[in-house]
Image (spheres, helix red, strand yellow):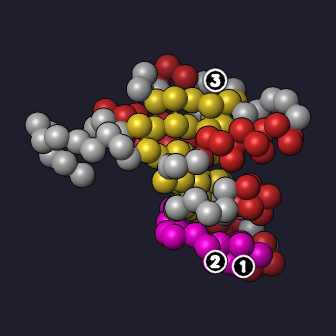
Amino acid sequence: MPLDGESRDVSLRVCLVVLELSIGGLEVAVVNLASTLAERGIKVRLVVLEVNEHTLDREINAGVEVLDLTHGRMLHRFIALRRATRGALVHIHFWGGCIRPWYRLIMSGRPTAASYHNVFFRPRSKNLLDCLVQKRTAVIVSS
């Protein structure tokens, strides 16, 4: 990442994907990440998949594109997610460590990093399933 005053590569595109955008700790961390990346000149898209309570809207940097996919038919939402992640480094942030295989399938072929949050409250069988699904993930971060 360039230091302040140095030129920035604006061709880098990052797509952050969350299930919901509410006041939770995970969501606050993602909004802070998105805003910081945008301040550094990186093109950032924040995709919300299932619940958008709009509680953090004022905290999001104006340079961040927010794509709300919480409404409409599931097929249309899946198509929009596929388009939204095209040509971008995808960073998935799901709570409980559950990446939801259908979302991962839709985003297959994208360079992807997955951050696991609050993984201690899941049955072992779900963790094993995620291990199988995540074989194509470039980076896994647990917090």
Q: Position of residue 114 (x, y in %)?
A: 56, 61
Query: Which amino acid lies under the numbered mark 1 shown in the image of this protein?
Result: Leu
Q: Residues within 10 Å of mark 3 (few under 14, many from 20)?
A: few
Q: Which label sits in the foreground, 1 or 3?
A: 1
Dot 3 amino acid type:
His
Whole-percent x and y of residue 22? 63, 33
Q: Is residue 127 above or below residue 90?
A: below
Q: Residue drawn 71% across and 73% down? A: 133
Q: Are marks 1 and 3 in contact (CB under 8 Å)?
A: no
Residue 132 - label: 1
How would you rate the neighbour count of disc 1 (Cα within 10 Å): few for under 14, some for 14-19, many for 20 or more?
few
Q: Is residue 3 visible?
A: yes
Residues at badges 3 and 2 in contact (C-beta under 8 Å)? no
Other residues around mark 2 within 10 Å, as few (<14) / some (14–19) / many (≥20): few
Q: Secondary structure at mark 1?
A: helix
Residue annotated with mark 3: 54
Q: Quadrant of residue 76?
A: top right
Q: Is residue 108 magenta?
A: no
Q: In which image quadrant can residue 10 be found?
A: top left
If you read the primary sequence from the N terminus, does the residue marked by circle 3 or circle 2 appear first? Answer: 3
Amino acid type at image mark 2? Lys
* Residue 32 seen by the camera: no
Q: CA distance from mark 3 to mark 2?
A: 33 Å
Q: Which residues are magenta?
A: 129-143
